[in-house]
Image (cartoon, helix red, strand yellow):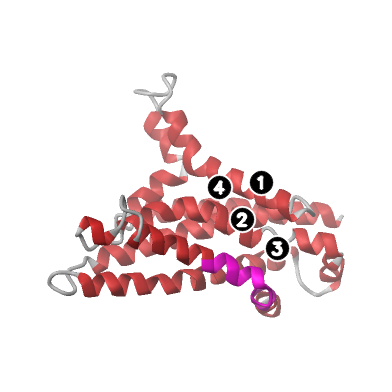
Amino acid sequence: MRAMYFKEIRSFFSSMIAYVVIGVFLAFLGLILWVFPDTSVLDNNYAQLDPLFAIAPLVFMFLIPALTMRSFAEEYNSGTIELLYTKPLSDAKLVLSKYFAYCTIVFLALLPTLIYYYSIYQLGAPKGNLDSGAIIGSYIGLFCLAAAFVAIGICSSSLTRNQITAFVIGAFFCFFFTWVFEFVSGLSIFYGRVDDIVERLGINFHYSSMSKGVIDSRDVIYFLSISSYFLILTHFIIKSKRS
């Protein structure tokens, strides 16, 4: 499992697309924080990272499916999945090794954003006038969101041998589980009755809480449940394709 984990990471960073995708991600967040007038820290005269955590789900909705679309689709297309089946590696370990590898890649992509934290920390008046505890909590929430999206992306990739199709399916399901439940909860059939229950089924409800720096065990359990569900589904798909 460890060999497969490192193989995935090496394979990803051996292609130019890895650096392009991560570079675009960091550049876009930089524009949000420093350039665009509606969200610029410099224009708002307030030292905070809230714009980063507000826009990150939308960016991750496209970034993570783009990262994970090749995880299984490429194996199917190149025929290397048959080689993996011959190795002493169970389907569960195969899925988990790819999952943890892509979670690591997302973590590495997030690390450079600490430069933005350091910059805002230095710009505070007085210097360091920043709620670091809340920001740490927000980063934990953002990584939980990313981990759930990775599970969705890998599951989408296991459905097809076409990477573009895997990307579209992954982006759709990320969008669906993030915002559709929130929209549906506002419909007259649910509003005032069970709208709060329906809204809690969506990712955005739980991420919004954690993005404020509040780490609630219910939110963590929700993200673990979403990730586990899609990983189990991926395992089932891989097993059915093997037979």
Q: According to the image, label 1 marks what residue?
A: 169
Cα separation, mark 4 vs mark 2, equals 8 Å
Residue 71, disc: 3
Residue 23 pos. (x, y %): 53, 68
Cβ–Cβ below 8 Å for labels 1 and 2?
Answer: yes
**Visible in this render: residue 231?**
no
Local secondary structure at mark 4: helix
Q: According to the image, label 2 marks what residue?
A: 65
104 is higher (above) or lower (below) than 141: below
Upstream in sequence: badge 2 or badge 3: 2
Q: Is residue 20 magenta?
A: yes
Residue 174, disc: 4
Residue 225 pos. (x, y %): 52, 52
Upstream in sequence: badge 1 or badge 2: 2
- The crowding category of the residue bearing disc 1, from other C-alpha atoms within 10 Å (few below 14, some 14 to 19, many at least 20), is many
Cβ–Cβ below 8 Å for labels 3 and 1?
Answer: no
Residue 56 pos. (x, y %): 43, 56
